[in-house]
Amino acid sequence: MTVGLDIKKDDTVRVIAGKDRGKEGRVVRVMPERRRVMVDGVALAKKHQRTAGRRTSAGTQLQQGGIIDVETFIDVSNVQVVCKSCNKPTRVGHRTDEDGVKWRVCRRCGADL
């Protein structure tokens, strides 16, 4: 069974719960089967990266090691889509054209998302 989400890739969302509450960002990846989204600049975790074992012919390392920030997934229930016209976080509604095309609409102002 496929799971449908109202949040798509490249949507602008605002985090409404968790340690990054209030931050806005663009959706980078969506995993609908696990109900998770990855938002640009939100839910950063520290990863300890080891240097790569290979070297170039000049003797320098190919990959630098150290502590890097990586983005992690957050639950889809912790984000809301930001409407482009009213610039506020909103719930997502649906309407159907006379042609049978389904559109996502803003519940606040009624504009297409």
Image (cartoon, grey):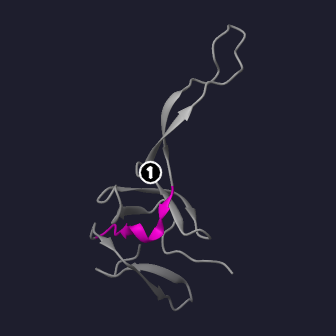
Mark 1 is surrounded, within 10 Å at the Cα level, by few (under 14), some (14 to 19) or many (20 or more) other residues, namely some
Q: Is residue 25 magenta?
A: no
Q: Residue at x 51, y 67 (%)?
A: 8
Q: Residue at x 27, y 70 (%)?
A: 86
The residue wearing badge 1 is 40
Q: Secondary structure at mark 1?
A: loop
Q: Quadrant of residue 24?
A: bottom left
Q: Quadrant of the C terminus?
A: bottom left
Give the residue at the far top of this rendering.
Answer: 58
Q: Position of residue 33 (x, y in %)?
A: 62, 70
Disc 1 marks a residue whose amino acid type is Asp
Number of labels in the image equals 1
Query: What segment is highlighted magenta in the picture?
Result: 73-85
Looking at the image, residue 95 lies above or below residue 55: below
For residue 102, above or below residue 34: below
Is residue 78 visible from the viewing direction of this image? yes
Q: Is residue 32 left or right of residue 86?
A: right
